[in-house]
Image (cartoon, rainbow, N blue to C red):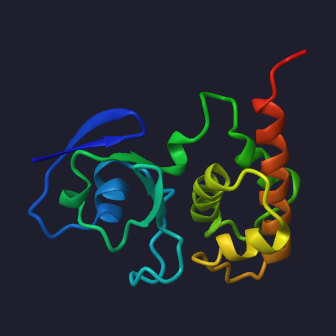
Amino acid sequence: MTVLKVNGRNVEISDRGDRTLADALRTDLGLIGARVSCSEGECGSCTILVDGRPQTSCLMLAQQAEGKNIMTIEGLAEGENLHPIQQAFIEEQGFQCGFCTPGFILSAKAFLEENPNPTADEVSVGMSGNICRCGAYPYIVKAVLRAAELMNAQAQPAE
């Protein structure tokens, strides 16, 4: 058995030592937001956050995640309240088919925590580890910029 901390709670999974984290999340925990596309860590569709850093879950073994904080797209919202990044992706239509969207959103979260006031060019570079096969990049950049605005407004103390 391997114990993982996923979206703030400890969970046990059966593991032989050769399972990817993506497989364990999807199969054992039903967290299907980490979508496996290339299985080579190139597309970013399976991106999750491990200790706050983007990680392609198709390349990480489940055992390697033991003792680390894992966040999937399912753990980003607080109940019915969307995270500002999720809200911005909806407002700016930062998706087309939606397959890559969870990976982009989690990559954007880590990016915006390091750079809360990015330029469009910085967003483009910051999101370069993720591929959108539909080509929604202009909308994704707009969504990340809008998310930065929403997060900065949320961080301002109320007057």
Q: Is residue 154 above or below residue 120?
A: above
Residue 3: percent from the left, percent from the top?
A: 19, 43
Residue at 69 percent of width and 76 percent of height: 125
In the displayed structure image, the side of residue 35 where residue 20 appears, left or right: left
Marker count (numbered) = 0
Question: Which image quarter is the C terminus in?
Answer: top right
Place residue 102 in its image quadrant.
bottom right
Place residue 83 in its image quadrant.
top right
Residue 84: percent from the left, percent from the top?
A: 74, 42
Residue at 80 percent of width and 39 percent of height: 152
Residue 28: percent from the left, percent from the top?
A: 28, 51
Residue at 78 percent of width and 55 percent of height: 89
Q: Is residue 21 above or below residue 122?
A: above
Q: Is residue 32 above or below residue 75?
A: below
Seen from the viewer's position, the closer of residues 119 and 49 is 119
Q: Is residue 67 above or below residue 54?
A: above
Which residue of the protein is positioned furthest toward the right in this rendering? 159
In the displayed structure image, the side of residue 28 where residue 96 appears, left or right: right
In the displayed structure image, the side of residue 78 where residue 134 appears, left or right: right
Residue at 78 percent of width and 49 percent of height: 147
Place residue 38 in its image quadrant.
bottom left
Residue 144: percent from the left, percent from the top?
A: 77, 58
